[in-house]
């Protein structure tokens, strides 16, 4: 069984994944898969070709600049997704597992990958908590954090078709209890 952990930026998907890992569950992350793609020369070449403005004066690719670019330019974001999503989807499709595996998928709606999963758990949090998390994690301003959230507005659709919704309003104990209760529904979990 493949279960997607999805939701908008700053909702706490990574924290849910950490709880699952600590509970002994097998996990994967689309963000980590994407980072591993950076070891793939043909993928890196595509980034250089499609985003030449992200090359620094030493000829190295500037990923911070790419992040700023894609959150400020929907066309560039779409271009990046057209390069990375097929590779991530291929990776997910080819994972063979016995038992249950959880995938953190930040852009489930945008990447149209819901069909790859048997169940979808969506993590939800109010914008107040999301903005605070983004500011602390990415060291950005309040307005930049809002821009990140606005860039992923379509991801709110995941709550319409999610099998389970996890509310993450800042209390780690409550989040852990929700995740453990959901696990009890699908596996024997102490």
Image (cartoon, grey):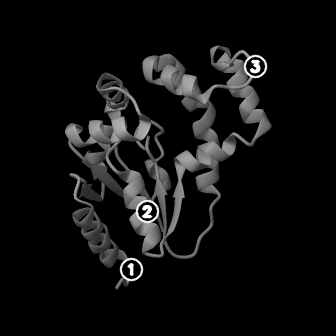
Q: Secondary structure at mark 3?
A: loop
Q: Position of residue 165 (x, y in %)?
A: 26, 56
Label 2 vs label 3, nearer the camera:
3
N-term-proximal mark, 2 vs 3: 2
Neighbor class of circle 2 (other Cα within 10 Å; few <14, some 14-19, many 20+) is some
Residue drawn at 44 percent across, 24 percent down: 71
Label 1 vs label 2, nearer the camera:
2
Instruction: Please say if the residues under marks 1 and 3 sit with CB atoms less than 8 Å apart.
Output: no
N-term-proximal mark, 1 vs 2: 2
User: In front: 110, or 24?
Assistant: 24
Q: Is residue 21 above or below residue 144?
A: below
Q: CA distance from mark 1 to mark 3?
A: 51 Å
Instruction: Please say if the residues under marks 1 and 2 sit with CB atoms less than 8 Å apart.
Output: no
**The quarter of the displayed image where residue 16 is located:** bottom left
User: In front: 65, or 121?
Assistant: 65
Per the image, the residue denoted by label 2 is: 18
Question: Quick check: 183 left or right of 118?
Answer: left
Q: Position of residue 65 (x, y in %)?
A: 56, 22
Per the image, the residue denoted by label 3 is: 58
Q: Secondary structure at mark 1?
A: loop
User: In front: 164, or 72?
Assistant: 72
Q: CA distance from mark 1 to mark 2?
A: 18 Å
Instruction: Please say if the residues under marks 2 and 3 sit with CB atoms less than 8 Å apart.
Output: no
Residue drawn at 73 percent across, 32 percent down: 44
User: In front: 151, or 161?
Assistant: 151
Residue drawn at 24 percent across, 46 percent down: 125
Question: Quick check: 98 left or right of 187?
Answer: right
Q: Position of residue 37 (x, y in %)?
A: 68, 42
Question: Quick check: 7 left or right of 95?
Answer: left
Is residue 137 visible from the viewing direction of this image? yes
Q: Secondary structure at mark 2?
A: helix
Per the image, the residue denoted by label 1 is: 187
């Amino acid at each position: 069984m493949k279960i997607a952990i999805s939701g908008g930026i700053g909702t706490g998907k990574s924290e849910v994944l950490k709880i699952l890992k600590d509970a002994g569950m097998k996990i994967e992350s689309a963000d980590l898969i994407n980072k591993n793609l950076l070891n793939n020369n043909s993928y890196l070449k595509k980034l250089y070709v499609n985003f030449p403005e992200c090359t620094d004066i030493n000829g190295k690719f500037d990923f911070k600049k790419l992040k700023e670019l894609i959150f400020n330019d929907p066309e560039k974001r779409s271009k990046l997704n057209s390069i990375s999503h097929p590779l991530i989807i291929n990776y997910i499709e080819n994972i063979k597992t016995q038992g249950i595996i959880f995938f953190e998928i930040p852009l489930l709606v945008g990447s149209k990958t819901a069909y790859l999963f048997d169940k979808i758990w969506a993590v939800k949090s109010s914008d107040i908590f999301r903005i605070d998390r983004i500011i602390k994690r990415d060291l950005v301003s309040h307005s930049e954090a809002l821009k990140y959230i606005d860039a992923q507005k379509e991801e709110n659709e995941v709550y319409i078709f999610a099998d389970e919704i996890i509310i993450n309003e800042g209390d780690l104990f409550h989040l852990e209890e929700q995740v453990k209760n959901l696990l009890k529904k699908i596996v024997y979990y102490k």
